């Protein structure tokens, strides 16, 4: 027999359990330009997790080229839960009690260069922290900048890694200055490298003053042994390189560039670590920084203004939908980030957008084929739902009481093209397919009266999104389409008052997006500057993540 007192006791135990699970989670993404070393760093992080959570032989890093298959191999070898979207592992920092299970790290993958798309941005709505990975020789690169702007806009704190310190590159101060000057973020190095780029000996721990000396291992396939050395012995051992690091550290302190947790969480400063993902130098330091400094999952506010705390009943946000390109299986995976409560596979949740129930019984079978099925998950975790036909990015799933989170913003497109069905007879399917792909958020769909419904304009942040549209039109809906790119490179949000005047301008076309936003497409930034100068009263607002 259960009394109401029993119920409330078990409720508070559940809440405590969920609070503990949420508090030990860190959910982050790596933002970087292609080739900066994201895949290598991902593997290096998992290697550390392996070391800490299991004993035994560590496998080499053969075939680094194909990360997804590497991950599957890694998963088999190491028993960690992997999908192409999120990598989860546990990490017990030195000195922490292993009985607590350590920290649970969720690394959410940002799709790479070839398929840079709106998905890349959307992933950032699912994380609590970002690791900005920078090539020591190249400094800030365009894709990193774009992704950083999204982090800034969303208030996501950023940890900076200067990677490839084992190769010749710039000096620490040059790199720091570049970040301050170009993006107004102040790096606060936690560690400084001992040895110039290309001669990476170890790290000066700026907080303890200690020297961490690394030893190279063959091909960086195993964790680099670390030796802690006191400052005096470090000076004897490394001579001028040690002195240089100590002086740089003092200079940074003088300029106020020491870590400050509040400023970091406010997105004003960025803890910085010098590393070599390839040699596994600085990787443990990154994990430690994530555990010590990155925020744990927090509750979120629904659109009605009510706060959903992590310990409240289950709720989650869908941030990515992936349709199988395999025409035999029209499967559709929706990835959700859990915001509150405990997820148990099999539970029936509500879909806020349609009001319909959604069964999660077979949610993980696609992951589960070769892999471990996720039976329970907590705030911060990413779970893939199979056959999620009705779900679109930004949708909310919940257990009563109802909550609906704000929609994911659409990001500034930079590529525009007209899509047409090859055969007029397929118009009906074409429309249906267009609506479907639009609702999934595969591309943004723009329309105006002049072009009409038969030739919508697609807007994307990466051209790969167009290929996805034409491929899916053919395989899933049986419609051959042709795509013709348009000579616009910028989109600005405008309003009905300005629309008419803008439509008369050369190099400008005005559209309405499916969500009702009125967008002006402009040929290039010089044209835009001209219009802004000549007609300062017109509304022309940048969209999120404008380049
Ligand atoms: P990405 O996912 O960001 O695109 O980068 P990825 O990890 O694939 O790394 C790009 C290249 O940079 C790879 O070389 C990789 O080995 C190298 N790299 C990554 N981290 C480091 C580092 O810390 N130090 C050095 N020296 N190199 C690094 P590749 O020649 O393209 O491939 P591979 O032949 O090494 O597999």
Image (tube, helix red, strand yellow):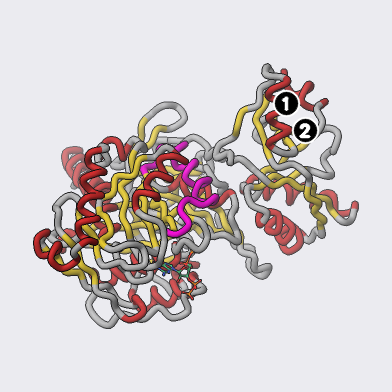
* Residue 506 visible at all: yes
Label number found at residue 531: 1
* Residue 343 visible at all: no
The kind of secondary structure element at disc 1 is helix
The local crowd at label 1, few if under 14, some if 14 to 19, many if 20 or more residues have their Cα within 10 Å, is some
> Between tags 1 and 2, which lies in front?
1
Q: Looking at this view, is 458 or 514 the one in front?
A: 458
Residue labelled with disc 2 = 508
Earlier residue among tags 1 and 2: 2
Residue 367: x %, y % from top left: 46, 67
The local crowd at label 2, few if under 14, some if 14 to 19, many if 20 or more residues have their Cα within 10 Å, is many
Identify the image quadrant of residue 245: bottom left
**Residue 542 higher or lower than 484, as above or below:** above
Left or right of 205, for residue 198: right
Q: CA distance from mark 1 to mark 2?
A: 10 Å
Q: Looking at this view, is 544 or 537 the one in front?
A: 537
Question: What residue appears at the point 35 percent right and 69 percent down from the top-left corner?
Answer: 80
Question: What residue appears at the point 32 percent right and 62 percent down from the top-left corner?
Answer: 196
**Residue 98 within the segment the image draws in magenta:** no
Look at the image and tell me in which quarter the C terminus lies: top right
Q: Provide the residue span drawn in magenta.
A: 136-157
Q: Looking at this view, is 255 or 376 the one in front?
A: 255
Mark 1 touching mark 2, by CB under 8 A?
Answer: yes
């Amino acid at each position: 027999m259960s009394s109401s007192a029993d119920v409330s006791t078990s409720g508070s135990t559940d809440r405590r359990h969920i609070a503990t699970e949420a508090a030990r989670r860190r959910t982050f993404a790596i933002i970087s330009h292609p080739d900066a070393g994201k895949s290598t760093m991902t593997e290096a992080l998992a290697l550390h997790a392996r070391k800490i959570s299991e004993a035994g032989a560590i496998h080499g890093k053969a075939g680094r080229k194909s990360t997804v298959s590497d991950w599957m191999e890694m998963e088999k070898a190491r028993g960690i839960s992997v999908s192409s979207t999120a990598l989860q592992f546990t990490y017990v920092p030195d000195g922490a009690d292993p009985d607590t299970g350590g920290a649970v790290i969720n690394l959410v993958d940002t799709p790479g260069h070839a398929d840079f798309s709106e998905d890349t941005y959307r992933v950032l709505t699912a994380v609590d922290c970002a690791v900005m990975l920078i090539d020591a020789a190249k400094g800030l690169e365009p894709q990193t900048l774009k992704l950083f702007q999204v982090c800034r806009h969303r208030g996501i704190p950023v940890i900076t890694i200067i990677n490839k310190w084992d190769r010749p590159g710039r000096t620490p101060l040059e790199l720091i200055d570049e970040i301050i000057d170009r993006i107004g973020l102040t790096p606060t190095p936690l560690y400084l490298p001992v040895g110039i780029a290309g001669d990476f000996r170890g790290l000066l721990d700026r907080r303890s003053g200690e020297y961490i000396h690394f030893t190279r291992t063959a091909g960086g396939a195993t964790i680099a042994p670390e030796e802690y050395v006191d400052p005096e012995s470090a000076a004897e051992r490394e001579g001028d390189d040690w002195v240089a690091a100590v002086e740089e550290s003092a200079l940074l302190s003088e300029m106020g560039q020491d870590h400050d947790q509040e400023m970091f969480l406010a997105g004003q400063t960025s803890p910085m670590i010098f590393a070599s993902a390839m040699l596994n130098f600085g990787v443990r330091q990154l994990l430690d920084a994530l555990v010590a400094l990155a925020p744990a999952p927090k509750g979120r506010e629904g659109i009605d203004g009510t706060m959903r705390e992590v310990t409240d009943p289950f709720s989650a946000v869908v941030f990515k939908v992936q349709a199988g390109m395999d025409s035999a299986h029209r499967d559709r995976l929706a990835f959700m980030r859990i915001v509150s409560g405990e997820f148990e596979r099999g539970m029936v949740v509500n879909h806020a957008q349609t009001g319909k129930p959604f069964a999660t019984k077979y949610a993980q079978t696609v992951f589960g084929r070769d892999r471990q099925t996720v039976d329970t998950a907590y705030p911060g975790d990413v779970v893939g739902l199979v056959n999620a036909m009705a779900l679109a990015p930004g949708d909310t799933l919940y257990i009563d009481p109802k909550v609906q989170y704000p929609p994911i913003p659409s990001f500034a497109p930079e590529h525009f093209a007209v899509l047409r069905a090859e055969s007029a007879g397929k118009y009906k399917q074409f429309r249906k397919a267009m609506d479907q792909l639009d609702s999934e958020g595969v591309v943004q769909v723009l329309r105006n009266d002049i072009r009409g419904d038969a030739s919508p304009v697609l807007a994307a942040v990466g051209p790969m999104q167009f290929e996805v549209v034409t491929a899916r039109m053919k395989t899933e809906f049986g419609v051959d389409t042709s795509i013709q790119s348009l000579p616009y490179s910028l989109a600005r949000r405008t309003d009905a008052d300005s629309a008419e005047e803008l439509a008369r301008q050369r190099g400008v076309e005005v559209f309405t997006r499916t969500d009702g936003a009125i967008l002006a497409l402009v040929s290039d930034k010089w044209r835009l500057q001209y219009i802004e100068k000549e007609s300062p009263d017109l509304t022309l607002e940048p969209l999120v993540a404008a380049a």
